[in-house]
């Protein structure tokens, strides 16, 4: 009886999970009407229409209130003025559907390229009526297709616009944030790669055990209890789950249509069930997941997760993602936007690409030209209407972070989330300090060489 009345030890005390307010803003990315008969010109026209008045204010602030803002049809040779339009890049090496069809019929394929840029690329600025070539002080190799910019210069004798300066739009307004008084963490992970054989599955289980409090002592559990939410930024399933025969077909036939291993989906369900039993989890779809290929990707279907779906803490969200955690606005993607820009520019730094999309005010500027996108008619949901406090991209080669402060005092934390199956790393963000730190899980056991000499057999027997 005395054993039953004994006070519980420190190891037996349950550590309560910290909580934080949450508001999902992903509804703007939900496709309610599926009409694919429209042309993409409407999307570009809407993008330019939304940016034009804001860019006018940026031009007046940067280059003076007396600068002339002209339409392309109003240009006069030699007159210094400003033009607002959408950038396009003419690239000979860009992929096209005819090349994929030639691969399907075993014709002479073109070599696979990591980047599609060449010295022959040219820049074009287009407004709602005309287009003109851009030359001089604008780097063709770093320009991003689909960005709306203001260019200052004049039309030269060659009927090309000679650029002196160019500018993106100012960052939109940012909602004031109040940091919590105590440490509160958000865990960001991507590229879990469930279904791919390898040591990373043990590392993934170690991450799950750490979050759920089954790894470490009571001090570790008190720290992990302050993790208030997990964001999984796409590619939870491995690309190797797809049918091997589908890998030889043209990509336009196999994008998210090849069968997915049911065992891999079950394993992912088991992992999510462990997590959501302890903490809220937001699961975004990615390029390798069984979701629609075009952006915005719609949430994964709940029927895939029979064990995890019984918990209200499982949140299947869109890609791109937008939500408020506490008083902080989170915005990000599963990484397709960054990967697309990487292929068409000489920019090798993924963090620089992520920052450029933020400064351009558009999460996916290469959509729909190089990145699959739904043909919107009356709006462009990828335009940044509110400046986030945290802006991230998943499935990147390595962890990177940057604290950005603009000229008006807005502070944004940029995060490149590494793919877990290759780096075994996730990211822990402290909402109190807005500092990021990588967490790497390694289950490899290294055997140290034994320097002890073997004793005599007779001595061992004695």
Image (spheres, grey):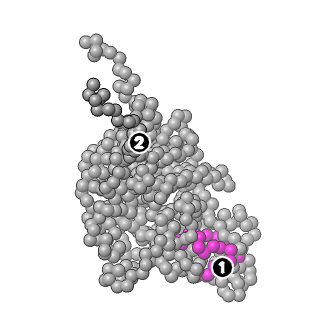
Dot 2 falls on a residue whose secondary structure is: loop
Which residues fall within the magenta stretch?
132-153
**Magenta stretch: includes residue 143:** yes
Q: Nearer the viewer, residue 171 or 228?
A: 228
Residue at x 35% of width, y 25% of height: 12
Q: Quadrant of residue 321?
A: bottom left
Q: CA distance from mark 1 to mark 2?
A: 62 Å
Q: Nearer the viewer, mark 1 or mark 2?
A: 2
Residue at x 58% of width, y 46% of height: 176
173 is higher (above) or lower (below) than 13 = below
Image spot of residue 110 (x, y percent): 42, 81
Relative to 21, 173 lies left or right: right
**Magenta stretch: includes residue 196:** no
Relative to 77, 72 lies left or right: left
Q: Nearer the viewer, residue 282 or 418?
A: 418
Dot 1 falls on a residue whose secondary structure is: strand
Instruction: Indicate the quadrant containing the C terminus: top left, top right, bottom left or bottom right.
Output: top left
Image spot of residue 151 (x, y percent): 66, 72
Q: Residues within 10 Å of mark 2 (few under 14, many from 20)?
A: few
Q: How many marks?
A: 2
Instruction: Indicate the quadrant containing the N terminus: top left, top right, bottom left or bottom right.
Output: top left
Q: Which residue is mark 2?
A: 448
Q: Residue furthest top?
A: 2
Q: Quadrant of residue 49?
A: bottom right
449 is higher (above) or lower (below) than 54 = above
Q: Which mark is residue 352?
A: none
Q: Say if residue 396 shows up in the picture.
A: yes
Q: Say if residue 333 shows up in the picture.
A: no
Q: Which residue is mark 1?
A: 135
């Amino acid at each position: 009886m005395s054993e039953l009345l004994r006070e519980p030890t420190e190891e037996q005390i349950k550590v309560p999970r910290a909580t934080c307010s949450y508001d999902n803003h992903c509804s703007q990315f939900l496709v309610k009407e599926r009409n694919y008969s429209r042309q993409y010109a409407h999307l570009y026209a809407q993008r330019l229409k939304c940016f034009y008045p804001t860019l006018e204010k940026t031009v007046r602030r940067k280059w003076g209130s007396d600068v002339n803002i002209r339409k392309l049809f109003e240009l006069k040779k030699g007159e210094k003025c400003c033009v607002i339009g959408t950038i396009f890049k003419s690239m000979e090496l860009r992929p096209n559907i005819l090349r994929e069809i030639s691969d399907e019929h075993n014709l002479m394929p073109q070599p696979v390229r990591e980047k599609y840029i060449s010295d022959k690329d040219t820049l074009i600025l287009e407004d709602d009526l005309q287009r003109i070539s851009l030359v001089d002080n604008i780097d063709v190799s770093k320009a991003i297709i689909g960005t709306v910019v203001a260019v200052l210069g004049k039309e030269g004798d060659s009927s090309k616009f000679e650029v002196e300066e160019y500018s993106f739009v100012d960052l939109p307004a940012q909602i004031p944030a109040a940091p919590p008084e105590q440490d509160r963490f958000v865990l960001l992970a991507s590229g879990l790669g469930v279904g791919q054989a390898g040591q990373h599955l043990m590392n993934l289980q170690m991450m799950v055990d750490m979050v759920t409090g089954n790894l470490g002592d009571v001090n570790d559990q008190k720290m992990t209890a302050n993790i208030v939410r997990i964001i999984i930024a796409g590619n939870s399933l491995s690309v190797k789950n797809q049918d091997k025969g589908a890998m030889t077909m043209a990509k336009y036939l196999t994008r998210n249509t090849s069968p997915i291993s049911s065992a891999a989906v079950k394993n992912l369900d088991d992992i999510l069930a462990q997590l959501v039993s302890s903490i809220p989890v937001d699961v975004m779809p990615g390029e390798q997941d069984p979701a629609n290929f075009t952006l915005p990707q719609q949430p994964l279907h709940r029927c895939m997760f029979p064990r995890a779906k019984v918990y209200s803490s499982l949140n299947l969200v869109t890609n791109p993602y937008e939500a408020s955690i506490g008083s902080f606005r989170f915005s990000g993607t599963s990484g397709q936007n960054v990967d697309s820009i990487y292929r068409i520019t000489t920019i090798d730094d993924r963090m620089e690409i992520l920052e450029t999309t933020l400064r351009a005010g558009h999460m996916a500027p290469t959509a729909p030209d190089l990145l699959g996108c739904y043909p919107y008619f009356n709006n462009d949901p990828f335009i940044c209407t509110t400046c986030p406090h945290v802006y991230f991209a998943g499935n990147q080669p390595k962890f990177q972070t940057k604290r950005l402060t603009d000229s008006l005092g807005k502070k944004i934390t940029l995060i490149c989330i590494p793919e877990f199956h290759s780096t075994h790393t996730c990211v822990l963000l402290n909402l109190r300090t807005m500092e990021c730190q990588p967490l790497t899980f390694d289950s490899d056991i290294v055997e140290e060489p034994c320097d002890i000499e073997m004793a005599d057999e007779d001595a061992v027997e004695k």
